[in-house]
Image: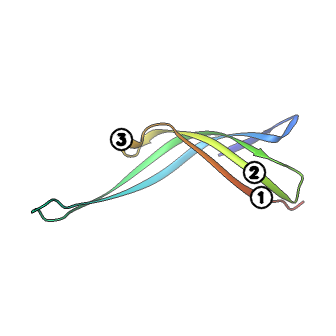
């Protein structure tokens, strides 16, 4: 992916990229008198991701909040082809 800080706002950056995935699904079913059925499938896929990074730059430990949305464009299970939203918090260690 690629992130670019906004000039004049040192704490905000915008990001965009492509996310590749390999989704493994496993399912086991057993009905009353039938033998157990197990199924496994692999789904390769690709998504477009857009996001924003909120960080406090200049500190030795930089608190970060990453907020992004992804839209699957290729592959993957049919039920997972909707818009996904993700928020991640953390701390980055800065060596300057």
Could you tell me how far apart the alpha carbons at marks 1 and 3 are, in whole angstroms? 36 Å
Q: Earlier in the sequence, mark 1 or mark 3?
A: 3
Question: Relative to residue 27, is residue 20 drawn left or right?
Answer: right
- Label 2 residue SS: strand
Structure colour scheme? rainbow
Which of pointers 3 and 2 indicates the residue nearer the eye?
2
Quarter placement of the C terminus: bottom right
Q: Residue at x 16, y 59 (%)?
A: 31
Q: Residue at x 44, y 54 (%)?
A: 22
Residue 35 at what x, y percent from top left? Answer: 13, 65
Quadrant housing residue 14: top right
Q: Which residue is mark 1?
A: 92
Q: Which residue is mark 2?
A: 64
- Label 1 residue SS: strand
Q: Residues within 10 Å of mark 2 (few under 14, many from 20)?
A: some
Q: Are discs 2 and 1 less than 8 Å apart at CB?
A: yes
């Amino acid at each position: 992916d690629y992130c670019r800080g906004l000039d004049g706002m040192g704490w905000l950056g915008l990001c965009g990229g492509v996310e590749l995935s390999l989704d493994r699904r496993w399912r086991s079913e057993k009905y009353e008198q039938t033998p157990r059925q197990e199924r496994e499938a692999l789904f390769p896929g690709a998504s477009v991701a857009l996001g924003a990074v909120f960080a406090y730059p200049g500190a030795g430990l930089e608190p970060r909040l990453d907020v992004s949305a992804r839209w699957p464009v290729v592959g993957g299970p049919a039920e997972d082809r909707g818009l996904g939203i993700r928020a991640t918090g953390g701390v980055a260690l800065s060596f300057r």
